[in-house]
Amino acid sequence: MLFDVSTAVTEQLHDELFIEKGISVSVLRLDRIHPVISGNKLFKLHYFLEEAIRSAHRTIVTFGGAYSNHLAATAYACGALGLKSIGIVRGEESATLSHTLLQCIKDGMQLKFISRTAYAAAATSPSLPGEHGECLVIPEGGYHPMGARGASLIMNLVDTSHTHICTALGTATTLAGLALHAKPHQQLIGIPVVKEMNNLDERIKELTGFTTMPAAVECWTGYHFGGYAKKNEALIHFINQCWQQYRVPLDFVYTAKMFYAVTDQVKKNHFPPGSRILCLHTGGLQGNGSLPPNTLAF
Ligand SMILES: *Cc1c(COP(=O)(O)O)cnc(C)c1O
């Protein structure tokens, strides 16, 4: 790895509920790697960064919204590795930049704002936009087979004794990466944080090169809390409860919804006794910076 990931430890969560159900629930703390380049983003970027380091131009272009964890991680990683980075931001430039974009600028990223329509066309196309010249283009969220290959490195940190591995789903690149390296006895569960995730099969096939959707991959819709970056009182209360009980800080966009789903399914007896569940803490804590002060207990 290009960055030290030794701080990404697995912690077992202690809860009467888990004892009662005869299961164990642990969390892989990818959020501990670094406050900005934390979680799954570092892994998804891995092979892109390696390629940029090897190339003569050493410039990365990528895409994101005003609160994008992916932009934040890319900016930081490029800054630390001596690469140039350009971030194409969805929407017009506003008078006050988000805390995420300010951090990107601090990390040396050059920002360009484009309209939502132009963005939609550009962000998901892996082709090289001419105006950026010879540089490495990373699609939004690292959605690319190379991003999935990078995400598969997360499995190097996962003990083979785990029977279920759960992760939040955005582009599904991380889930695809897990599918590349999972053991046959491991069930992979993705929890979409967006309202519409109806082409998951296509995504997984495109990202992995598999011709069929692996049977071990499961998707739990119904935990998006109204859609991407939407939240309610119950979710905020849940985040504070997890902090009080487990000392695990969650982000409201991704990991809180995943944890909420897992807890709910434990209560509903989805997991047979003896299950050893691993939840990926995919990071994203910088995103909590958009919440009003004192919303969270940490
Ligand atoms: C981006 C992100 C995800 C989603 O990852 P995908 O590979 O796009 O599915 C999950 N959790 C966090 C914290 C993220 O920032």
Image (cartoon, rainbow, N blue to C red):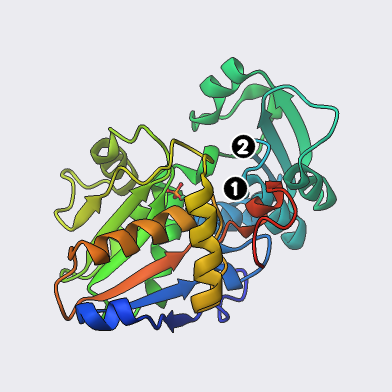
* Residue 289: image location, x then y, percent: 71, 52
- N-term mark: 2 or 1: 2
Q: Is residue 105 visible?
A: yes
Amino acid type, residue under disc 2 in the picture: Gly
Quarter of the picture containing the N terminus is bottom right
Q: Quadrant of residue 174?
A: bottom left
* CB atoms of marks 2 and 1 within 8 Å: yes
Going 44% across and 80% down the picture, which residue do you hit?
10
Residue toward you, 250 or 86: 250
Q: Which mark is residue 70?
A: 1
Left/right placement of residue 49 relative to residue 258 reads right
Left/right placement of residue 127 relative to residue 77 reads left
* Residue 211: image location, x then y, percent: 17, 43
Residue that badge 2 annotates: 64
Q: Secondary structure at mark 2?
A: strand
Number of residues whose C-alpha sits closer than 10 Å to that of mark 1, classed few (under 14), some (14–19) or many (20 or more): many
The answer to whether the beta carbon of the residue marked 1 is less than 8 Å from any atom of ligand 1 is: yes
Amino acid type, residue under disc 1 in the picture: His
